[in-house]
Amino acid sequence: MDNGRRRIMIAIQSSLDGQRRTFKELFEFFNRHDFSVGGNWDIDGGFFDLKMGADEVEGKYYFLRIPGIPEQGNFGENDAIIRLGTPFLLVHHYQDNQDDTARYRTYTAVMDQFASPVEKDAPASDEWVRRTEEWLRKIEAKFPFH
């Protein structure tokens, strides 16, 4: 433990790192487990994001983010071969003066693209690092492609 010091974007070792599957297989697996494809992907790569929670007081959203790097084809194409990268905890800190309905939608795990982050890569507490590791271990245990 580091006595509550705050961190920025924490990489987490995982058995998913380096796994290779088609985009379709990965998309279907992650979609079944409440992940979405992050809004900033392009043909060269993207992220599978799981919104784990929010701190409404501080205006922070916590994501488990798993990078996907195409080795054959383009990210988003069903038959593209995608290699998973090192998962990490990502924290977005959004402006406090935004209307809650405009910046947070309960029907999707995707952050509202119209709310500008105050800090794109906000610090994370030890508690959120621990929670992220727990979520990741659950996903690893369910991953059918080892």
Image (cartoon, rainbow, N blue to C red):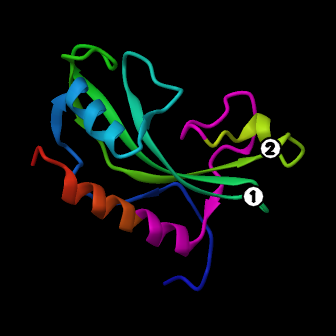
Q: Nearer the viewer, residue 146 or 101?
A: 101
The amino acid type found where label 2 is placed reads Asp
Instruction: Return the x and y of residue 125 as percentages of the image width and height.
Output: 59, 70
Specify whether residue 15 is in view: no
Q: Nearer the viewer, residue 104 or 90?
A: 104
Residue 120 forms part of the magenta stretch? yes
In percent of the image, x 34 and y 18: which residue is there? 76
Q: Nearer the viewer, residue 74 or 55?
A: 55
The amino acid type found where label 1 is placed reads Glu
- Is there CB contact under 8 Å for labels 1 and 2? yes
Instruction: Return the x and y of residue 54 as percentages of the image width and height.
Output: 64, 57
Q: Is residue 94 above or below residue 13?
A: above
SS state under label 1? loop
Q: Residues within 10 Å of mark 2 (few under 14, many from 20)?
A: few
Q: Where are the magenta residues, as a range?
A: 107-132
Tell me the quarter of the picture where residue 57 sits.
bottom right
Q: Is residue 59 left or right of residue 27?
A: right
> What residue does disc 2 label?
100
Q: Is residue 7 above or below residue 22?
A: below
In percent of the image, x 41 and y 44: which residue is there? 34
Say which mark, if any, is on residue 56. 1
Q: CA distance from mark 1 to mark 2?
A: 9 Å
Q: Of all residues shown, which one is farthest toward the left?
A: 146
Q: Of all residues shown, which one is farthest toward the right?
A: 97
Residue 11 forms part of the magenta stretch? no
Specify whether residue 117 is in view: yes
Say which mark, if any, is on residue 139. none
Sequence-wise, the earlier of marks 1 and 2 is 1
Q: Of all residues shown, which one is farthest toward the front?
A: 107
In percent of the image, x 62 and y 76: which residue is there? 5
Q: Is residue 43 above or below residue 137?
A: above
SS state under label 2? helix
